[in-house]
Amino acid sequence: MWKDAEDNHFIAIAIVEEGAEYVLLRRFSFTPSERSGKNVFALLTALQDRYPGKRLMGTLKTQPLITNWEQFNEH
C-alpha cells in the first residue's frame, strides 16, 4: 500500500514480485480521485527507491508506463 506524502492517506496499492536482480510490477491501482500521471510516476519512483540496485520491470500491461517513466527520468 502506498500513502500520499502530503496528507498521509493510502491512495494506491501495488503488487510486486521481487527477484534477485529485478522488481516486477504485476499490478497497481489508485483510488479514483488520485489517478493521475503524476501519481503513477511518483509510485514508480517510490518502488525504485525501496528496491535500490534492482531493475524495475513490468508485465505486458504495466511495462508501457514503466518505459514512459524511465524516459521521463532520463531528461
Image (cartoon, rainbow, N blue to C red):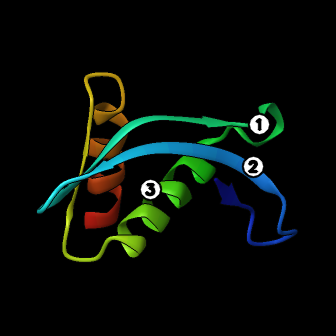
Residue 1 as seen in the image, left or right of residue 65:
right
Instruction: Please name the residue shown 28% across and 76% down the image.
Output: 52
Residue ID for mark 2: 11
Q: Position of residue 39 (x, y in %)?
A: 62, 51
The disc placed on residue 44 is 3
Q: Position of residue 10 (x, y in %)?
A: 78, 54
Residue 46's place in the image compared with 36, above or below, is: below
The disc placed on residue 59 is none
Q: Secondary structure at mark 3?
A: helix
Q: Are marks 2 and 1 in contact (CB under 8 Å)?
A: yes
Q: Quadrant of the C terminus?
A: bottom left
The local crowd at label 2, few if under 14, some if 14 to 19, many if 20 or more residues have their Cα within 10 Å, is: some
Q: Along the polypeptide, which appears first: circle 2 or circle 3?
A: 2
- Residue 75 shows in the view: no
Instruction: Please name the residue shown 52% across and 44% down the image.
Output: 14
Q: Position of residue 59 (x, y in %)?
A: 27, 29
Q: Quadrant of residue 48?
A: bottom left
Which amino acid is tagged 1?
A: Thr
Residue ID for mark 1: 31
Which amino acid is tagged 3?
A: Leu
Q: How far is disc 2 from disc 3 in space, using C-alphas?
A: 14 Å
Q: Secondary structure at mark 1?
A: loop
Q: Secondary structure at mark 2?
A: strand
Q: How far is disc 1 from disc 3 in space, using C-alphas?
A: 16 Å
